[in-house]
Amino acid sequence: MQENLKWYRWNPYTFWNDSRIDELTLEDMAIYRALLDHMWMHKDCCLPDKDEHNARRVRASVKQFRSSKNALFEVELLGMENGCLISPELQKVRAESEKSYQFSSKNK
């Protein structure tokens, strides 16, 4: 992983002012944030849709993971692409970060 892509931009103001989170429980939000972190560690920013494995990743029971995953799909914070869980917002952040990294690398 490129050095500057070990972290991602997170805007708490945008998150807490998004009306979609009004529908989520604290557990849903914690699972969402953990999923974002795990997605970021993969270049394509997606995780295979394997509930048992992803539940272990985020330290949740399979039952709680499935409940939260469904809630996150309902409010469109998570999506599915080619059998993988994705976050459209995180994919945008990733694309911007890679573009910025490529630009800064060319100007060194």
Image: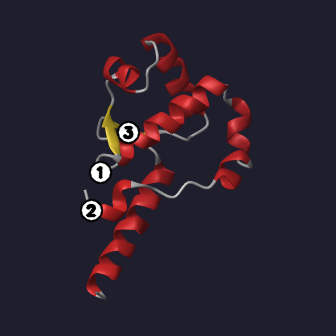
Marks 3 and 2, how far apart at CA: 16 Å
How is this picture coloured?
Answer: secondary structure
Q: CA distance from mark 2 to mark 1?
A: 13 Å
Residue in the picture at 65% in, 26% down: 26
* Residue type pointed to by label 1: Asp
Secondary-structure class at tag 1: loop
Q: Position of residue 17 (x, y in %)?
A: 74, 49
Q: Mark 1 or mark 3, which is nearer to you? A: 3
Q: Please report the residue visible at 71 percent of the width from the left and 46 percent of the height from the top.
A: 16
Between disc 1 and disc 3, whose residue precedes?
3
Q: Nearer the viewer, mark 3 or mark 2?
A: 2
**Mark 1 and mark 3: span between their CA atoms?**
11 Å
| Percent position of residue 27, x then y | 60, 23
Q: Position of residue 87 (x, y in %)?
A: 46, 45
Measured as percent of width and height from the top left, residue 71 is found at: 58, 27
Residue occupying image coordinates x 39% and y 74%: 100
Q: Seen from this angle, which residue lies furthest bottom?
A: 107
Q: Which residue is mark 3?
A: 38
**First reached walking from the N terminus: tag 3 or tag 2:** 2
Q: Secondary structure at mark 3?
A: helix
Q: Secondary structure at mark 2?
A: loop
- Which quadrant is home to the C terminus? bottom left
Task: Identify the residue under disc 2.
Answer: 2
Disc 2 versus disc 1: nearer the observer = 2
Q: Is residue 87 above or below residue 55?
A: below
Question: Pointer 3: residues within 10 angstroms few (<14), some, or many (20+)?
Answer: some
The numbered disc on residue 44 is: 1
